[in-house]
Image (cartoon, rainbow, N blue to C red):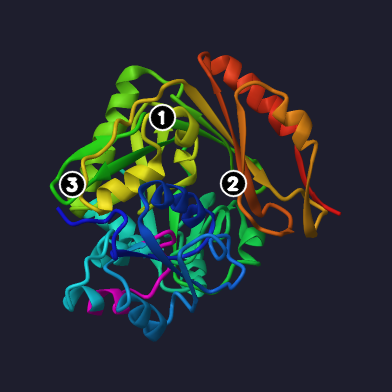
Amino acid sequence: MKNYFSSNFTLGVLGGGQLGRMLLSETQKFDIYTAILDNDKNAPCSEICNRFEVGNLLDYESVYNFGKTVDLLTIEIENVNIDALEQLEKEGLPIFPKPQNLRIIQSKARQKHFYIDHQIPTAPFSHFAYLEELKHAIEHAALQFPFVWKAARFGYDGNGVKIVRNFTDLENLPNVECITEKLIPFKNELAVIVARNLNGEMKTYPVVEMEFHPEANQVEYVICPARIDEKVAQKAQEIALKVVHSLDFVGLLAVEMFQTIDDEILVNEVAPRPHNSGHYSIEASYTNQFEQHLRSILNLPLGNTESKVAGIMVNLVGEEGFSGNVFYENIEEMLRIDGVTPHIYGKKETRPFRKMGHVTIVNKDIDKAREIAQKVKETIRVISK
C-alpha cells in the first residue's frame, strides 16, 4: 500500500470552499499533505491547507498545471475543467471521482439520460437546447404547465431551479440549455450517501430526510435516520447502490431522491463528493463522510457508516435584509443547549441565503433532536454588523 501518512505524498483538491475546509480536518488527522486550487484567494481553505493556489477551476491550463504538482486529485465542487482532468488521467494521474463520471454529473441533462439508459427510476423529463425551444414546445402543446425548470449546468442550492406554473414564470429564466421535469407530488425528499473504493468495497450511510426552506429552495434541516418505513429505506439504498454500480464510481456519491405518494423512489440528482446531507455524520456517525471520502479515494478500508445517535443538521444561512461583515447573533445562547455543535465555514461576508455554516444536534431520541433543531433555528441569526 502507498504511504499517504507523514510522507511526501500530496493530495490535490479542486475547490477550497466549506466542503474542502471540513475535508482538511480529516487530512490533518491523518497527516496527509494537501494542496488546494480555488478561484478566491480568501476561500475557506486558504489559511489552513498545506499549499494554496489561486486559479480558475474552469480554465484548462490552471487545472492541468495544478494537477502536475500532485500525486492524486479529488474535488469538492464538480464545476471544473473536465478536458484538463482527462488529459491528466491519460498521463497517469489518479483522479477520483473519475473524469468520465464528472462529465455526466456536470450536466443535469446527461445525468437524466444516464438514468433512463440504465433503468434507474427518475421523474419524466424533456431536454431543450435553449429557452425559445422550450416556449415553442409549450405553444405546440408538447409541454404542459406546471413543471420544474432546471439549468443543465452550474445550478446549485436553489440557483438554476424554478417551478414554472405559467408564462409569467418563464420571463426571468436565462436563455440556456435546460431540462424540464414533470412536477411530482412527493411525501419526502431523501438522500443516501454511498462510498466505494477502487477495490469495489461499498458502504451506504442511513437514509436521511431533508426539509427545505419554502422560498430559497435550500435544505433547512437534514434528519438522520429518515422517519420513513424500513421497506422504503431499503429500496432507497438499493437504488443508490445501482447508481454507483452503473457509473462504476469511486469516491463518495450523494444520491438525492423523492419518495412519491405511492412510496416509489425516484432519483433527482447526484453529487460526486461530500454533501450537505452528510454533515450530521461529523458528530453522529462512527465514520464521518469526509473521512470516508478520503478512505474511498485512497483505496483504504471503508469505515463504519452506522450512527451512534440520531443526528439533525441545521443550515446556517445569511438572513434576508443583511449583507456585509458577518455576525452570529445569540451563538452563546445556542451553545447552552445540550448536544449542539456549530460549524462556522470561515466566510467573512454574509448575504441573504448564503451558506455560512451549519449546526449539528445529536440526541438518542430523533423527535427530541428535531425539537432542539427548531429551537436552534429560532435562536441563532446570521446577520451583519
Q: Which structural element holds mark 2?
A: loop
Residue under label 2:
218
Instruction: Note whether 144 is above or below 104 in the view shown.
Output: above
Residue 136 image point, x, y percent: 48, 70
Q: How many marks?
A: 3
Q: Nearer the viewer, residue 3 or 130?
A: 3
The label number, if any, that marks residue 254 in the structure image: none
What kind of residue is marked 1? Ser
**Distance Cα–Cα, label 2 vs label 3:** 29 Å
Residue under label 3:
245
Q: Nearer the viewer, residue 217 or 225?
A: 225
Give the magenta part as a residue range.
75-87
Residue under label 1:
285
Q: Residue at x 65, y 49 (%)?
A: 216
Q: Nearer the viewer, residue 245 or 90?
A: 90
* Residue 382 covered by magenta stretch: no
Work out which residue is located at the far right of the displayed protein and give it. 385
Quadrant of the frame with the C terminus: bottom right
